[in-house]
């Protein structure tokens, strides 16, 4: 056995990146399980009012207290996770898919489609997310669906830019030239050679896009342009609790904390993946 | 300059794209525009005769096809005529300039404050990478990036304004009204810039020439000030330029949270009252500002980077 | 016409980009089973030659004939990607292999045009792996899990599996360690004799050319400086530049001192 053979065998152990990805998957699964357990374990409903027990601070029966209608804040936070995290997940995922598709098409086809597509992308890119969302949701009527449409419209451009520039640089690499020499059709080259090498960076960008969208969804809902109360979205809960800020601060502290912690966890996960990716290169 | 000129056709196309998107948005917005205009003109009336609505439609060419309406509007915009606000009947430009100052004051003061803190934090952090001070700075900037600014604003109102009574909570007016909004936005600036400055300084400090200077016995402080900082400044300035859009967005959220007047409140108010000329102008303004700033940053970067001057 | 028609015949190849000539009037022949070494310093046009012949650069010639693919052209070199019945082995094996694909899949892609069943393709790949002395376990390995030499052998297998009549090599050994270089050079030579494939090897390594080449072509600033059989080249180079090159290699010790000429 030569030295090279030993080295190659030792590197067959899972890389730190793979191990971390597994841990992330396990963590996500555990979080989802915990959420499901919460839904099952809570004796309250998200809209279940108890007028005798309004604005109660955290107690043994209501761990996170109750709001101005006597609804259990803990239960509403659980349902809020579904809205805040779920909506932003869907929006950023749509952005990832649409943006990547446009980027790959722009990067892989001729100069004219590339130019046209990138100018369109640049035009959309110029609209700051929140301004576009406030305008759209305001003009078309503040509602959950309009919030989703508005944020989706401005969520894809980052992915287009990244996937296009990566696709362009990968298309010049030797292994793609080999595939072209071997007569592989362009679609197969895109799918087999370019896409797998673009995905890791796109995923890192997607984590940051997801966390930004969480902030945008809850922020717009808090400002009245998104999910409307009484739906238990975290930003809408904040808006609901704002008038009682002085007497019952727990109404606004817990939803905000939920946003902060979710965004922090997603950001730190993305940073770690990025660092590990940079190390393997 | 040459680089900038070569980008000019693309820039013009992007600006046209922006105007098209803006106009399409207002064109598709539900609700009858003639009724909205009539409501604004005659606030006391509840119902309007069809002849009046038709007269308004004719006046604003509301029955014309999409393309001719768009070209008509674009022509006016290019001549600098942005129309009258539906609700106040004053030129959009005047309303805009009246509100611009508040937003710029907020943005500039928080940018200054945030950068100052970020600069100090990053300089302290890179002195001893890995120390508790460094980790603290990184943690603080992570928290700052994840912090919903509207929530931070509420916490500050609760803590500083309500409990301590040190500063007024809502509204505009005195300098004191600026304190809490500026602190809120500055926290975000501090978070994003500490992280950037720290990584740029670390990168500049690990370059070969810095090692050479150390071997030559030049004091650490002088190396840091004269070489590391200078090398870290160029990329950092670029990033700060690119982050101006986020700063504007942050300013809008903060304005709405603190019920301050400014462009953000103006946008939200006009959107909800369907004052389309104001909305279209503001949206165009933000998008154009973003594109122009980006192109300028790009041009400056190209001019300062000899490797890209091919 | 000679009775022994060469496998690959090139006459007067010229490549110009933006009015700048990169190659001027390059001609050579390669017969089956022969190795032609293209030598020159960096920038002399060696890689341009390969790229032009593979259709990546616009080029013109007086005559180009490649009998296995039935190619006989004069004027513009056809701009199709890849010369049929030929393969190209690149300098850096790790760049030439997709890091996300197993070696087996990468090698199998070379048979894409033949539309084999998955089973037939796999057995062909395993055979090609054994030809370059890699075990069947390499079929499922990723490029990141093998050494540089093993990766280059996989690239060699990818070229051989299609049974081409001509293989282009672009500095195939320069990314490797000396011992691995020696091993792979020997393997290349043995496979060439076994399969009777013609090799065109771009290299700057005169000792490799001295050991294995049949003919040698020296390029300098896009022009042919010398085109001779190996023995003639090392005994009596055609040009002063070639003499200088050989002299430099001898004084550096990469080539043995001059043999006493008769």
Image (cartoon, rainbow, N blue to C red):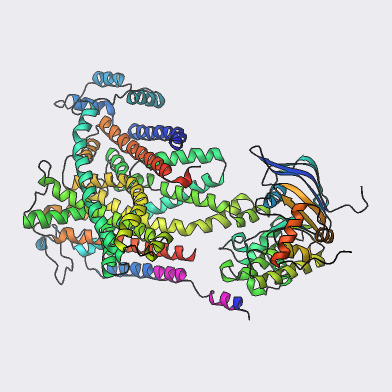
Q: Nearer the viewer, residue A33 or A25?
A: A25
Task: Give left or right: position of B218 versus C27.
Answer: left
Q: Relative to residue B79, is residue A1 depicted above or below?
A: below
- Secondary structure that dominates the magenta span: helix
Instruction: Say which residue appears at 34% left-offset and 60% top-offset.
Output: A267
x and y, in percent, of residue B117 in the image:
23, 55
Q: Residue furthest bottom?
A: A1
Is residue A245 visible to us here?
no
x and y, in percent, of residue B123 in the image:
28, 60
Instruction: Say which residue appears at 61% left-offset and 57% top-offset.
Output: A175
Q: Relative to residue A253, is residue B71 depicted above or below?
A: above
Task: Give left or right: position of C200 versus A39.
Answer: right
- Which quarter of the rendered picture does the C terminus of chain C lie within? bottom right
Counting labels gives 0
Q: Is residue B27 magenta?
A: no
x and y, in percent, of residue B111 in the image:
24, 48
Q: Nearer the viewer, residue C126 or C82?
A: C82
Instruction: Say which residue appears at 19% left-offset and 35% top-offset.
Output: B99
Q: Relative to residue B232, is residue C73 depicted above or below?
A: above
Q: Nearer the viewer, residue C239 or C89?
A: C239
Q: Relative to residue C190, is residue B10 depicted above or below?
A: above
Instruction: Say which residue appears at 79% left-offset and 62% top-offset.
Output: C213
Task: Give left or right: position of A86 versus C137.
Answer: left
User: Which quadrant would residue A234 be assigned to in this image?
Assistant: bottom left
Give the residues in magenta. Answer: A6-25
Q: Nearer the viewer, residue C64 or B199?
A: B199
Task: Give left or right: position of A240 versus A137.
Answer: left
User: Which quadrant would residue B108 be assigned to in this image?
Assistant: top left
Q: Residue furthest right?
A: C3
Is residue B15 visible to us here?
yes
x and y, in percent, of residue B12 in the image:
42, 32
């Amino acid at each position: 056995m030569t030295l090279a053979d030993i080295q190659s065998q030792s590197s067959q152990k899972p890389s730190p990146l793979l191990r971390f990805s597994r841990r992330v998957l396990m963590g996500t699964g555990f979080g989802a399980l915990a959420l499901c357990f919460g839904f099952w374990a809570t004796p309250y409903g998200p809209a279940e009012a108890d007028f005798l027990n309004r604005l109660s601070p955290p107690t043994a029966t209501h761990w996170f207290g109750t709001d101005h209608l006597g609804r259990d804040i803990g239960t509403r936070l659980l349902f809020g996770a579904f809205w805040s995290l779920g909506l932003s997940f869907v929006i950023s995922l749509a952005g990832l898919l649409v943006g990547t598709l446009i980027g790959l098409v722009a990067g892989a086809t001729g100069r004219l489609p590339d130019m046209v597509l990138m100018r369109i992308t640049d035009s959309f890119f110029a609209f700051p997310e929140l301004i576009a969302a406030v305008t759209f949701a305001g003009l078309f009527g503040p509602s959950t669906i309009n919030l989703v449409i508005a944020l989706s419209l401005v969520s894809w451009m980052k992915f287009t830019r990244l996937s296009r520039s990566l696709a362009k640089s990968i298309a010049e690499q030797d292994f793609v030239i080999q595939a072209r020499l071997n007569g592989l059709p362009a679609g197969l080259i895109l799918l087999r050679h370019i896409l797998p090498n673009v995905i890791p960076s796109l995923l890192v960008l997607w984590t940051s896009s997801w966390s930004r969208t969480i902030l945008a969804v809850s922020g717009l809902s808090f400002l009245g342009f998104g999910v409307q109360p009484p739906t238990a979205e975290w930003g809408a809960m904040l808006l609901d609790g704002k008038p009682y800020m002085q007497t019952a601060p727990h109404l606004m502290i817990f939803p905000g904390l939920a946003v902060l912690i979710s965004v922090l966890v997603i950001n730190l996960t993305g940073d770690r993946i990025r660092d590990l990716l940079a190390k393997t290169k | 300059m040459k680089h900038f000129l070569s980008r000019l056709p693309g820039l013009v196309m992007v600006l046209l794209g922006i105007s098209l998107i803006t106009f399409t948005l207002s064109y598709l917005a539900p609700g009858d525009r003639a009724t909205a205009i009539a409501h604004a003109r005659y606030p006391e009336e509840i119902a309007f005769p069809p002849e009046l609505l038709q007269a308004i439609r004719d006046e604003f060419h509301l029955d014309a096809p999409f393309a001719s309406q768009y070209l008509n509007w674009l022509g006016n915009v290019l001549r600098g005529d942005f129309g009258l606000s539906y609700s106040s009947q004053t030129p959009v430009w005047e309303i805009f300039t009246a509100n611009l100052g508040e937003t710029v004051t907020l943005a500039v003061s928080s940018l200054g404050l945030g950068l100052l803190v970020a600069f100090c934090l990053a300089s302290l952090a890179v002195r001893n990478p890995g120390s508790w001070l460094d980790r603290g700075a990184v943690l603080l900037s992570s928290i700052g990036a994840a912090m919903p600014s509207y929530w931070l604003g509420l916490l500050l109102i609760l803590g500083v304004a309500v409990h301590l009574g040190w500063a007024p909570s809502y509204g505009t007016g005195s300098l004191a009204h600026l304190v809490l909004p500026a602190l809120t936005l500055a926290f975000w600036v501090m978070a994003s810039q500490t992280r950037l400055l720290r990584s740029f300084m670390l990168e500049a400090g690990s370059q070969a020439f810095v090692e050479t200077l150390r071997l030559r016995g030049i004091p650490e402080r002088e190396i840091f000030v004269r070489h590391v900082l200078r090398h870290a400044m160029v990329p950092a300035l670029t990033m700060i330029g690119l982050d101006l859009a986020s700063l504007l967005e942050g300013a809008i959220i903060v304005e709405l949270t603190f019920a301050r007047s400014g462009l953000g409140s103006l946008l939200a108010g006009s959107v909800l009252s369907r004052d389309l000329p104001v909305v279209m102008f503001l949206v165009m303004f933000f998008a154009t500002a973003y594109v122009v700033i980006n192109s300028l940053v790009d041009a400056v970067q190209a001019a300062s980077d000899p490797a890209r001057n091919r | 016409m000679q009775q022994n028609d060469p496998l690959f015949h090139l006459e007067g190849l010229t490549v110009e980009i933006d009015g700048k000539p990169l190659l001027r009037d390059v001609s050579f022949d390669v017969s089956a089973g022969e190795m032609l070494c293209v030598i020159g310093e960096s920038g002399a046009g060696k890689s341009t030659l390969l790229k032009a012949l593979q259709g990546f650069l616009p080029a013109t010639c007086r005559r180009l004939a490649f009998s296995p693919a039935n190619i006989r052209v004069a004027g513009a070199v056809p701009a199709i990607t890849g010369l049929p019945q030929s393969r190209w082995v690149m300098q850096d094996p790790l760049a030439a292999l997709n890091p996300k694909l197993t070696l087996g899949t990468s090698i199998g892609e070379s048979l894409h045009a033949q539309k084999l069943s998955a089973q037939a393709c796999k057995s062909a790949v395993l055979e090609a792996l054994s030809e370059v002395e890699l075990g069947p376990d390499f079929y499922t390995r990723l490029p990141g899990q093998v050494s540089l030499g093993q990766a280059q052998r996989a690239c060699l297998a990818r070229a051989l599996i299609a049974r081409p009549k001509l293989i282009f090599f672009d500095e195939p050994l320069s990314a490797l360690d000396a011992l691995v270089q020696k091993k792979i050079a020997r393997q290349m030579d043995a496979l060439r004799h076994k399969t009777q494939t013609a090799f065109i090897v771009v290299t700057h390594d005169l000792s490799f050319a001295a050991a294995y080449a049949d003919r040698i072509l020296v390029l300098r600033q896009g022009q042919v400086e010398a085109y001779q059989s190996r023995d003639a080249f090392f005994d009596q180079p055609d040009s002063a530049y070639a003499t200088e090159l050989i002299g430099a290699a001898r004084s550096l010790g990469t080539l043995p001192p001059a043999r006493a000429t008769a």
